[in-house]
Image (tube, coloured by chain):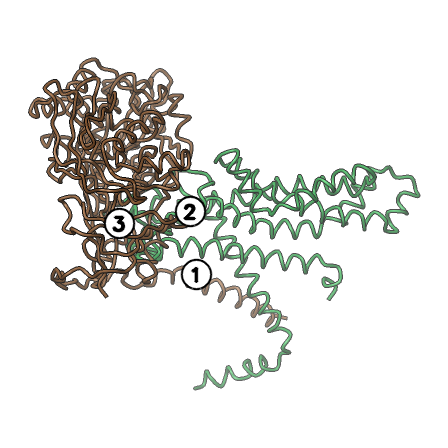
Amino acid sequence: MKRQRFIKWATYVSLTTALTLVLAGCAAKGGEATSSTDSSAAAPAVAKPVEGGELTYALATSPDTLDPGASGFAVSHRVFRNITDSLVVQLQDGSFQPWLATEWTKSEDGKTYTFKLRQDVKFQDGTPFNAAAVKANFDHITTSARGQAKSLIGPFESAEVVDDYTIKLILSQPFEPFLSGLSSAFLGISSPQAIQQYGDQYGKHPVGTGPFKFVSWTENDEIALEKNPDYNWGPPTADNRGPSHLDKLTFKIVPEEATRIGSVQSGQLLAAEAVPPQNIAALKNDPQFQVDQAITNGTAFSLYFNLKSDIWSDIKARQAVQLAVDVDTIVKTLYLGTYDRAWSSITPGLLGYDASLENKIKPDLDKANQLLDEAGWKKGADGIREKDGKKLILRYLDGSPNREKRNDIAAIVQQQLKAIGVNVTLNITKDTSTPLKEGNFDLFGNSQVKADPDVMRSIFQSGKEYANGGTNWSNLSDPEIDKLLDLGSEESDLEKRKEAYTKIQQYLIDHAVILPIYVFPYTVAHPKTVEGLKFDLLGYPQFYDVSIHK
Amino acid sequence: MKDATALKPLWKSERKRPARSWHLGASDLFLYAAELVVLFLIVCAIVPGWVAPYSPTMMDAAQLLQPPSVKHLLGTDYFGRDVFSLIVYGSRDSLLIGLASVIVGGLTGGILGAFSGYIGGWIDQVIMRIIEVLMTIPGILLALAIAAAIGPSLINVVLAIAAGTIPRYARVMRSQVLSVKNRAFVTASRSIGSTGFRIFRKHVLPNSLAPFLVMATIGIGTSILTGSGLSFLGLGVIKEIPDWGTVLAQGRGYLTVAWWICTFPGLAIALFVLAINIIGDRLRDKLDPRKSGA
């Protein structure tokens, strides 16, 4: 009997030991994950482009519609940019060059633009391209009045056909960002014949003058395009003069991050967009692959304070948060050095960007604490500040799913603000619209893609609050800012425009209306055999020059 | 050498022992291991601060994505948080969800089933038809739908998981009650004039509980799995301290560069569910009248 007991006891002891060992054994070194082999492979010499082949390109999300005049999504732009051309093209330096228009003039009062059009262009369905076609497009946009196009045309009033190849676009007031808008694919020119023929269904059957023709769209799977053999009117930014090198261009919709990148690594697809930061380093070290990073423009991803909130309408409280959030750490932690930190509401590539804001705000917890003390918020027993029995709560609103790791920014901000006694409550939800409309939030993150600083007008002008159908997340209402925003939009003197935008950017930081976090780089991973991929001013990919080497 | 000879008889006598004792040891082995795992996680859930070396919210930007090492037993995640500490602290929510949903689902299902089986008649018909309709929807799907509809909070997640398990408990309870209530001792009790409620409380219920308890035990494991699944899909509770499913979801994108972020929480879930199943299995053997005699 004693022996049996001993065995039982021994089993227990050995088991306990074994389990402890197993648990502790998890500490065993897991092997180095990152290899540090430097890829010293020189970039291949630019060879003559190879004709033919099919480029398969993985998109992270699906376009809503391929009707340029009706979409508001960047991903749709990436697709229909290949199908439609624009009147003008905007270069990286912000200046404009002819494309479908050969030349243009702006009237003295800045309200009328006259474009002379190319005479050798025809749409993919055979319809000739002329002034009447351009007018039909503007009529289409103004009557259906949807998407980005509507905001890009600004105070557009009417289009007037002067002769077959001359068109006049008339505005109700001067609008400086107009040319920039015209260069966007959201104002790309569609075939008037197709718009009429397909009506509401035009978004599923786009026809333009671009280097690729629409073939088919399988919902949530792929969009297939093929070469337009007649094309020889590419923009001056392209090297190619004839039809596209690629026979086919197929967009695959692959929302799952790991699958998207994996399909390129395994060779199933030839390119994938939106490469997660943790994969960029690994892919860059692989001699077979290349990761292109394009600067995007518009507003930097920023956190907008709700100025209508009880607590955070107090500038001192906002400034305390501004000093307590360590943006450098956030960007370094989450994006591993692949994203740049933002300093202003707009991206560095935009006209009037105020570089003097860089390094202006440094984290300073002492000062942040002092500001909250001055504002009457005293630390309670649990470390959270209180005033008149009310806790210092910051309701952080963010969208789901976790796009660009924005939910993780919220998690870090929550921890960082704990240090100054602010209780951050996270509301991460698919439906951000309801809290935004009802004003049940204190902080909300957002970014917008646009080529002109006028993008700020839709975000900071009074009357454009979310409840009124606008995107003034902060509910900012300051007549001085309103005036400056209007000035920026109407002023044709470049220096005066810049000055107005500089003042606005400084105001936003000085009054702690926003916390700029990062500038998003558009990333594409592809094998080195894919050559000639270029990006426009907004970071949209250009496939016209792409060729695939064997 | 002397010592070795001295030990010899002991060794011999052990060889002589029948194989049966070793057999007992082997199956006990698993049970002890399982009990240990469960015990450890219960300690983690109650006093995580004693076990975890770091705070689960401490984000160390200098220690991002570190592989397992002496300093960080299971490595660090992309916030620079210690994965081991995350698992230890995450056990609280995971266990809480598991237990609470079994209690809610088990009580509701058990009461419905017992009621339905004991009373019978049209009440039985109505309840069982409802249960059958619920049965047609897979539990995880029902949980997903409910979680998506009523939004993420701890109580909602518990309700969502519990709802999916009600039919199973109800059916097991009902079938047990049905078979017990016609046994001779019940009839005997009725013949001496016991009231219906007394018979139910004194005879039917105690004799029907065994399978139900086994199911509830195993149900804890299943519920934790479902709870983690909901969190993984982003329908769980969003809190400062993530539960296992959330850590798993966060680490998923890093699988190729930092396998440890989602491997270890995954192992924790697997180990715990396995342990609970082993215990449940043994409990079944113990409560089985045919086996317990042996």
Pair 3/2: label in front = 2
Q: Label 3 vs label 2: CA separation?
A: 25 Å
Earlier in the chain: of badge 3 and badge 1, it is 1
The x and y percentages for residue A245 are: 22, 56
Residue plotted at (53% across, 47% down): B226
The residue under the point 53% across, 64% down is A12
Tell me where residue B192 sits by quadrant. top right
Q: Residue A381: image x %, image y %?
A: 35, 26
Please tell me whether residue B271 is drawn above or below residue A417 in the rendered image.
below
Instruction: Give the labeled residue for mark 2.
Output: A220
Side (left or right) of B213 relative to A338 = right
Q: Colour of chain A?
A: brown
Could you give the CA–CA distance between mark 3 and mark 1, rounded to whole angstroms?
37 Å
Under mark 1, the amino acid is Thr
Q: Is residue A153 above or below residue B234?
A: above
Disc 3 residue type?
Pro
